[in-house]
Amino acid sequence: MTEKRQILRSASIITVATVISRICGYLRDQRITLLLGTSFAADCFILAFRIPNTLRRLVGEGALSASFIPVFAGYLREGPNPAAWRFAERVFWIIAMVSGALTALGMLFSRQVIAALTILGGPVANWDLAVYLNRIILPYILLVSLVALAGAILNSLHVFGLPAASPILFNLSMIVFSLGVVYRPIMRWAPVQYRSPAVALAIGVLAGGSLQLTVLLRAVYVRGMRFRPQVSLSDPGVRTVGRLMIPGFLGIGAYQINFFLNTIFATSRRLPAGSVTSLYVADRVMELTLGCFAIAVSTAILPMLSRQAVAGKIAEMRQTFGFALRMVLFVTIPAATGLILLREPIIQVLFQHGKFSAQSTALTSRALLYYSLGLPGFAGIKLVTPLFYSLKDTATPVRVGVYALLLNMVLNVIFLMLFSGSLSNGGPALATSISAYMNFSVLVTIFRSRFGRVGTRSIVRSIAKVVVCAGVMAAGCVLALRYVHFESLGAVVWQAGALAAMILGAIGVYLGLAWAFRCEELREAATVLRAAGAAAAI
């Protein structure tokens, strides 16, 4: 199997699992918004949930995986062996100790943590519910850290499906805890001032994390890891992971930290109530596209980049990255176009139920507009940062990540102080999108200057074709929106049918034009779909 086909096959397996997980994730978020809408209780829950969830993204999709896999790959040159498992066990117990200590400190100083996050939103006493929910949810930090390590071990062994599918258990757990037969008794158990479905949802977070960890630890145990308690900070492999991981929280996770900063700015009294929840929901809709393909490809190429780096095959690394970038842009550019144009009907159909009102839809659609503008940049960061990590270079992504972080903060302040009336809750999203493009473009420029071209001409040629195809598709979407009025369709089933027809029509136009322009990515995408079908049938 060629390396391209190996990437596509691995990505297709991850995509199948991720699509199912994202569907369950949508049902989870739909239940949250149905119960809480964009109310103050919703903002409190999202604020408390953001802390461990951001760590999940930083660790699970970022620093830990990118730091651990290249080192573990060195131990696995000749296959799993006692030295490799000894190294993995030492990392496991160190991660458990560190994340356990962070959990305990966070629970102890929960009020101070929430006060820091709501510094723009008035006295911390106004956020007592968030303090209470934060204490419930924080142990998820320990669970998700170990889940991330177990997933990295399995990915190193070329087991992609199970780690990608484990979030399904998390989402199903929260869905169960959102049902009345579960959350109503829990509400009665909670103190009177905190009686909200948000309390049950917080407990559902812990239950879901526990299920994930149980399944993945069993899979790792079956493959040879025995979890013998041992801690060794002098282990060369452990020290290497530490050197890569600590700065990696800023390097590979810079744009995730930007999302976290958005939550802080969204608590400002200058922005409308419900801004925290609207940004979360918009982020989730955007992540549906990002997660189903960009994260799948980046997860699949990291072990391959690590092997190529160990072997000194820099030219092959450049080719791998160029190929992956063309594939991801082929999907994300038209996806961003569709999200921008169809944002209001998408939010209306997916979430406008229960306490999520038309006002909530308008608020969330504005945030989705500005997040969607940055979708190709977010996807690009997912691909370019592993290039540096596979070469065990964390300094460069950190430096660039810090500059992107500072840019995001400056833009947030400017938008909040000068343009809060026009941008409203879209300001934080726009700041994050701009900083993402800066982060991605600078990293690509640096890598290209050090190691040579990454196929820039073919990438630019591919982007030009994609932009033309997406532009014609956009014209079709605008024409369809002129004649389809979702409010007049009545029942949500008719609205969903009209939206599905518009999306399928847009995809058909885009793919038809891509075929006419002989886009090479279309053939590769067909390979992904065939491999995905085979993976789903297994």
Image (cartoon, rainbow, N blue to C red):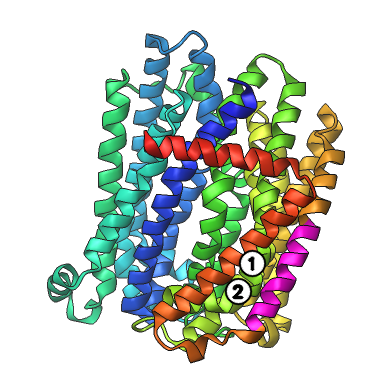
Specify the principal SS of the magenta part. Answer: helix
Q: Position of residue 379 (x, y in %)?
A: 64, 50
In the depicted view, which residue is nearer to us: 222 or 243?
222
For residue 383, side relative to residue 41 (left or right): right
Disc 2 residue type (three-letter): Leu
Disc 1 residue type (three-letter): Gly
Which residues, given as a range, are shown in magenta? Answer: 467-481
The residue at which mark 1 appears reads as: 338
- Residue 198 colored magenta? no
In the depicted view, which residue is nearer to us: 149 or 403?
149
The residue at which mark 2 appears reads as: 342
Toward the top, the furthest residue is 78
Say which residue appears at 65% left-offset and 52% top-offset. 331
Q: Secondary structure at mark 2?
A: loop
Q: Position of residue 119 (x, y in %)?
A: 52, 73
Proximity of marks 1 and 2: CB atoms separated by less than 8 Å: yes
